[in-house]
Image (cartoon, grey):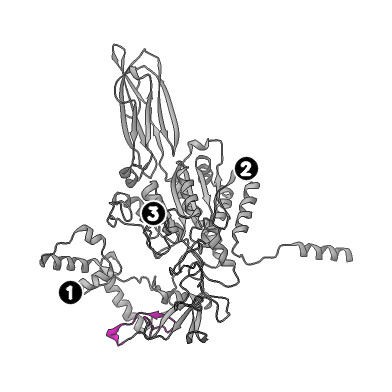
Amino acid sequence: MIITLLLTAQLVATQPIDQKRVWRTPSELRTSISTIADTNESVSVNTIGTSRNKQAIQVVTIVKGAQPQEDRPAILIVAGIDGDHLLGSEVAVDIIQELLGRDDETTESLLQTNTFYIIPQVNPDAAEYYFSSIKNARRRNLRPFDNDRDGLVDEDGGDDLNGDGYITMMRIPDLEKASKVVDPENPRLNKKPDPLESESASFIVYTEGIDNDGDGKFNEDSVGGVDLNKNFMHGYKYHSDGAGPWQLSEPESKALADFVLGHQDIAAIVVYGQHDTLSNPLKESGKDNAGAPKTIDKADEKFYEKLSKTFVKLTEITEVEQPSWDGSFVAWAYAQYGVPAFSTPLWGRPAIEKDSDSKEEIEKKEVVEEKNALTDSGVGDISQETLDELLQAAESAGFPVTEEMMADITPELIEQYAKMSGVHIKRVSKETNGKSDKKGDGAWLAYSDEVRGGEGFIEWTPFDHPQLGQVEIGGWVPYFKTLPPTSEIDSITTKQVDFLVELASRLPDVSLETPIVKELGNGLWEIKVSVVNNGWLPSGTAMAKKNKRARPFIVRLDVPNNSIVSGQKVHRIWALDGGGTRTWHRWIVQGKPMSNVSITLFSEKFGTEVTTLPLKSTKGGDA
């Protein structure tokens, strides 16, 4: 009996305790990757570069089955460019296991015919800061940088003055510099004062801390650095905050670009980070001074929109804020590398259902219904009807509006033009189905209070500042708006794998059809063959076709040059739409009956196909 009890106690002691999942450090992520690779022959791991602090930046390659890798298209998944986006790195590592663990026929077939490259963490140095004893969200890498141009670097960052373990914000009652006022609808929030409401600025907001370098500025020169998602070539902004001293100035961004340029088999790219091109599909928005598109080519809008609908259906992610993608990796991947490229933050604030409608809420709904009858112009919450009125007013006044002017229009400009023209602005409602507002700090507060037990916001509390006197300290908890509860990671991963499988199934499927040979007499033969794309996506984006960045499909007739009477030996196909679209290629050659000729279809992204046939009259090619 005693021996049984001892054995039972020992067994219980050795059982794993069901603990809440925690975020993994960069080192722990690398260990997890190594464990997966060591136990699965379809997985390999390589280092593509190192961060400024010499941490390895790794790529995981999944190649399953016997088909040669050089004959497979690849999908690249990139995460952790933004140092505060730990969620992307977690999901990227978990995706490896889920892809390999699924036993459904569709996933297995795609793994047998496609390559998956996964780079889980491009910016490990910044990610490391999440695990500091004092939380201070950090997106940029650790390049020493003199933000205030005083000859010193990284000398004046935030300080945890009240000892709560977070670096938040300070409200400072400085009327000379004041730019904010307490939001009367929610005193926890700050807003710009509205003079028409008799509001005047009463305080300025600084990051929590002291003036470490004695220059009269507070926390203006923190550790780092460069925002890697501003450091790529497309839309790069010289001298802008966080963009870096030059394009690809950082070892992390340079390693990523080098990897992509060295792997022309990549047919699509998915990024997990701050940008959102999936729940909010991009639209054409004019060109920059160099003539390059600011977003995407209009001819690519359709497939982005359709993939967006699929993404939203599978993931239920909607209405995520889209920051500027200037200098971002996803912008470069689309516009200059030349493949369909997508980005998602993986998670956004969930909408909160309201329990009941008060009289005031019913009145608001009536206003919302009126607003919902208007047309969304895509410029803030301004209705298309308002834009039409402004256009008519401008034309009546003799000021024609060009497409270039409309491409640069902003809600602020519309406000100004409306006042000048006497046009009343009609706004499209952003509220639907009784759910809380999709945007805004007020909605984040409601989510924090009602769903997360108030853990997202630290109440403003008076504090006697050693240099500024009486201030208030409080604000958003670092990482709260970026990271969901860890309990949601598994569900997010499953949904993203669903989307990746769907994306892989929609890649171009370009092949040679059966050639047609016709004898013309006197040893002459006509050879015709069609190349067809039975996939869903085009073989090249419209943007890649315009800038000749996408490598073309090559159709080559493998016969001696002097035997070709008519037709080019090599044909190039820069882009071929999906859905069974085909292109025909024709040659007249001289040769002996029954002698063999070969036709080769070659693509760096999709491999090589060769068909060999004798010179005899045939039927084929669905002609």
Residue type, label 3? Ala
| Residue plotted at (59% across, 43% down) | 42
Q: Main secondary structure of the magenta part?
A: loop
> Can the viewer see residue 543 in this picture?
yes
Say if mark 2 contacts mark 3, CB within 8 Å: no
Q: Quadrant of the N terminus?
A: bottom right
Expressed as whole percent of the image width and height from the top left, the position of residue 144 reads 50, 63
Residue type, label 1? Met
Looking at the rendering, which quadrant does residue 511 occupy?
top left
Q: Quadrant of the C terminus?
A: top left
Q: Which residues are magenta?
A: 179-198
Name the residue that disc number 1 marks: 420
Looking at the rendering, which quadrant does residue 587 occupy?
top left
Determine which of the numbered discs, if any, sits on residue 41 in the image. 2
The residues bearing labels 2 and 3 have C-alpha atoms spaced at a distance of 34 Å
Judge whether 165 appears above or below 16 on screen: below
> Can the viewer see residue 1 in this picture?
no
| Residue plotted at (58% across, 76% down) | 165
Determine which of the numbered discs, if any, sits on residue 372 in the image. none
For marks 2 and 1, the one nearer the N-term is: 2
For marks 3 and 1, the one nearer the N-term is: 3
Residue type, label 2? Glu
Name the residue that disc number 3 marks: 331
Q: Secondary structure at mark 3?
A: helix
Nearest the viewer among 296 and 4 is: 296
**Residue 57 counted in the magenta span:** no
